[in-house]
Amino acid sequence: MTPNTVKSLEYTAEAEWQDILEATPTICKEVLAQAVASNAQALADHFYAYMMEHPQAKVFLDHDSVHDRLHGSMMRWLVEIFRHPLTDTAAVVAHQRHIGEVHARIRVPVYLVARGARLIKKDLSAALAAQFDDAKLQENGVSCVNQIIDLALELMSASYEKNSQRGARDDEAYRMHSVGQNIAVERERQRAVLLEWGQEVLFTLHRSSGAEQLPSLGKSEFGLWFSHKASAMFEDDADVGQIDIIIERIDTTLLPMLRAPGAEIRPRDVLIRELQAELNDVKFHLTQLFERHQEAESGRDTLTRLLSRKFLPAVMNREIKMAQTRHTGFALLLLDLDHFKRVNDAFGHDAGDQVLQQVATLLQSSVRNGDFIFRYGGEEILVMLVEGNAESAMRLAELIRAKIEAAAIAIGQGRTVHVTASIGVALYGGHPDHLYLIKQADEAMYRAKNQGRNRIVFSE
């Protein structure tokens, strides 16, 4: 599902949400809003008690801080979707999409969300039955409950799917990186496979009885790789569409003409030249694809050679899962070079690049082989200390801070500069959403800056 599909769905949902409300009698909406507001606590209590009966739900809910936080979120969500009068439908619809993104990020299975929604429908239907003696009003109220919750789930699911697919692609990219897969090698391999297919076609054409058995490009080794791997790796790239069109044209037009017995529609040598031209076009578009995705080639930032930020969700989700199953911990150190803009302004961006490169090298010499270092953005670098605690995280942070402060960083022409870093430290505490921990580290890092820079702040 593309981002445009989700946006289209979201736009349609606003009108559908309004249609549901307009079709529901005002008395039903008022009673429903009041029932939800007064029973939100009990509804949330029942919801989480019910969900905790499911063993897989405990992975996401069996932590006090998460439970407390989500409990309040559930109450606010119920009040939000059944609010009367509803003044901002667009905001409500957008919030359902955001909830889907969060569910995808922490990998809550969709069936667990559906399980909880089923209970909410049942509880609210029972609450309405107690409020209305009139069967028609009760029917209208229950219909409103069911339609609103179903539409909210539809929006969540659409966003969940999009974000899950993106996460799956990043997970696969990280897997390829971690086993040493080199996309430059893959590029040459696929070019060689494409060449082999072309040679096989020519060889078959020169055999006396082989013309009817010309191999399909779409079913060849290259075609299968392109359909099942390249199209996912390079999703939404225009060159993917162009290669797809060429493969279709070769298989449905050129090959049938080359297979034709007796008198050809066009001379065979002309058709072979056309085939070669089409294959050259495939090679051109293939080269364009790989060149535009060099970051995926090594999985590293091109300047610092640190891990790409795109792999951060994949790595953190693996560490969170490991921490949950092995009862271990890890910590994040988010550092920002102080007054880095002054380096760029005084000495130029090339000097700034050299500072970043040498700081990256310094960090790599400070951590263990099992730890991870990411170029987070600009002059920000994120260190993940695996199987670490508060004491070891603060010790590493101080080592890094002191090394950066003491380093005389060469910037060319015999010049050196000194820089310092502000570091925020956050310890994994059980929350399943990796962005929650990053946010803690980020807030701690900004507190370090606000307190005078060149210091460490531990997130409480």
Image (cartoon, helix red, strand yellow):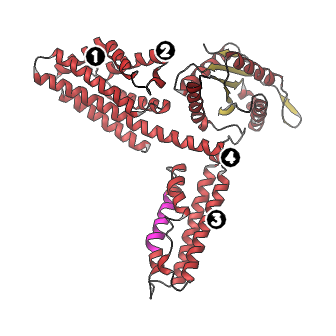
Q: Secondary structure at mark 1?
A: helix
Cα separation, mark 4 vs mark 3, equals: 20 Å
Q: Which residue is mark 1?
A: 36
The residue shown at (39%, 39%) is 7
Task: Report the magenta residues as a range.
Answer: 241-254
Look at discs 1 and 2 and give the one toward the viewer.
2
Asked if 172 appears above or below 97 in the picture, the reply is: below
Label 4 or label 2, whichever comes before in sequence order: 2
Q: Secondary structure at mark 3?
A: helix
The residue shown at (48%, 57%) is 241
Amino acid found under the numbered disc labelled 2: Asp
Estimate how packed mark 1 is, as few (under 14), some (14 to 19) or many (20 or more) residues with alpha carbons within 10 Å.
many
Asked if 72 appears above or below 181 in the picture, the reply is: above
Q: Which residue is mark 4?
A: 180
Q: Are marks 4 and 1 in contact (CB under 8 Å)?
A: no
Q: Which mark is residue 64?
A: 2
Percent of width and height locating residue 218: 49, 64
Q: Secondary structure at mark 2?
A: helix
Amino acid found under the numbered disc labelled 1: Val
The residue shown at (34%, 35%) is 154
Cα separation, mark 1 vs mark 3, equals: 64 Å
Taking the magenta stretch, the answer to whether it contains residue 248 is yes
Amino acid found under the numbered disc labelled 4: Gly
Q: Nearer the viewer, residue 335 or 114?
A: 114
Q: Which mark is residue 139?
A: none
Label 2 or label 3, whichever comes before in sequence order: 2
Percent of width and height locating residue 455: 72, 16
Look at discs 2 and 3 and give the one toward the viewer.
2
Cα separation, mark 4 vs mark 2, equals: 40 Å
Q: Which residue is mark 3?
A: 192
Quarter of the view holding residue 375: top right
